[in-house]
Image (cartoon, helix red, strand yellow):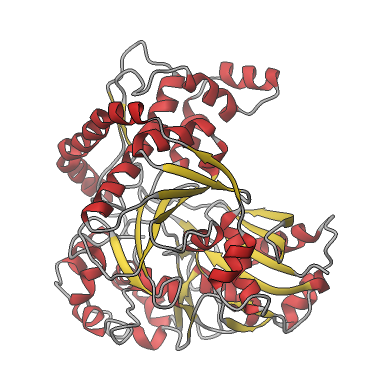
Amino acid sequence: MSRYILGIDAGTESIRTGIYDELGTCISFGVSENTNIHRNPGWGEQSVSQWDRSMLESILNAFEGSPVRPEQIEGIGLDGTSCTVVHLDEQGKPLRDAIMWMDIRAVQEAEEIAASGDPALAYVGYGNVSAEWFPCKNLWVKRHQRAIYDQAHTIFEHTDWMAYWLTGEITANINTVTIRWFYNCKDGGYPRSLYTKIGLEDIFEKLPKRIVNLGEVVGGLSAQVAQLTGMRAGIPVAGGGADAYMGVVGVNAMRPGKLALITGSSHLHIGMTDQELHAKGIFGTFPSAIIPGMEVVEAGQISTGSIIKWFVENFVSHQYFTEASERGISIYQLLDEKAAQIPQGSEGLVVLEHWQGNRTPWVDANSRGVIRGLTLKHTAAHLFRAIMEGVAYGTQVILQKMAEGGVFIDEIIACGGAVQSPLWMQIHADVTGKRITIPQEQQAVSLGSAIAGSVGAGIYPDMLIAADHMVHIRDVVVPDMERHEQYKLYVQQYIQTYEHSREDSRVLTRELQKGNTE
């Protein structure tokens, strides 16, 4: 008889709940949309009360029409966006909207933290600190919204809020505290010296006292949520982590030499190594952030799929939409077809995909997007392909930085929205020169959460064994090495585009940020 687990993935655009069996088969899926709030350039927030509704709706939608009944679920795993910060009062109610992972308002705070020289900055190779990270955002709140900071009884992340919503337990998870809070389980936990230097020495009384590992039981499902969903009260809810990191589990990239490419609104690149190392331009290595005893290296691009969506929604003409409708295909499929007919390099276009700044390797929140080389010959298809290529150039620069730091990747395992485009996957393979493996289950993040849930439920003894049983391969994309050689010029042009525009972007973004504190 099959055994069933819920994997709940709270992403940027929606909360998605998958019902999986013990072999990783997705039985049914439920989705509830999120709304993003952008009050100022570079800001991003979401309503916590909206999460309340979306969590429940996505779970109920997963059971609607499913052959699996709620009472058959044996465990729950979860993940959320990171670093998305939540401030709760003493009664557990939100004091403000959550500050999303993509929010980069805390540029000044990030620069001050980077200048502190604290040993904890080894995680960023003693280079720039991302404005997305936990201490940056909380320092901004303390400075600009002091009443909220002072009233906060609990400060944690999206994933931790999900665990709280399901169980009533206040916890933090080893994944996000390590990758975004500078926590180091090998060196005493929180880097108190760093937080003291930047004026956040009082934050520790607001942080959860208990930190849980991936797959560890946070607590039992609360009676209130059980009543709302029909699931059994008390079933184990397992510790999860950041959505992209759970995607690493969901594609089974938990061994050295493999890189998980998690795609969606952004790209995240995560690899495993058995040795600690630190290098400028990459994040980590993070000890035990996924598997106890293993180190994790991370890089990422903030704006990838979100730029494709932005371009299609704002600049593609009705002519294209009409053609797609008449042919019964999506606008994205049509643009893929047309872009495939454009020569590599998009006839001289170079796109710098920094619409929301750069996460790695430059860690530059002030950088902004560039489209270079436009002529009257260029069409929407040229631009569509050039955006795809620009994102792939960013990925290649990241792989080069990882290699410089001593992390060598043999295989990329990809999942998420970009995998729906065979053209984009081939572009990634050609630009990087790496084989790309595509798993059968493309909802890899929710599958990763279900894998953690299976461990919490006792179906499997650990995360590696669970992933080996629940992840299966669908396809392999082989790079064209001749095109790889030809793309090297464009990768270099991409790098030079950033270097030449860096200071100008800094001036303009600083001007726009003046006064944006409320």
Which residue is more in the foreground, 115 or 508? Answer: 115
* 335 left or right, relative to 297: right
As displayed, is residue 216 above or below residue 410?
Answer: below
From the viewer's side, name the closer residue of 315 and 28: 28
> Relative to the observer, which residue lies in front, 132 or 218?
218
Q: Residue at x 45, y 64 (%)?
A: 84
Residue 228: x and y in percent read 77, 72
In this view of the protein, can residue 324 be seen by the observer? yes
Specify whether residue 50 is in view: no
480 relative to 207, above or below: above
Toward the top, the furthest residue is 377
Name the foreground residue: 3 vs 6.
3
Taking the image as shown, residue 223 lies to the left or right of residue 350, namely right
Residue 297: image quadrant is bottom left
Q: Quadrant of the N terminus?
A: bottom right
Measured as percent of width and height from the top left, residue 61 is found at 76, 57
Position of the C terminus by quadrant: bottom left
Residue located 70% across and 23% down the image? 328
Instruction: Please tell me which residue is depicted at 35% across the width and 44% down the height of the picture.
Output: 395
Q: For residue 221, what is the image quadrant?
A: bottom right
Question: Can you give x and y, in whole percent of width and height, for residue 264 in the image?
Answer: 50, 47
> Residue shown at 63%/66% (left/top)?
450
Horizontal side, residue 429 vs residue 19: left or right: left
Image position, residue 268 (x, y; %) = 41, 53
In this rendering, would 173 be left or right of 360?
Answer: right
Position above or below: 209 against 247: below
Figure label count? 0
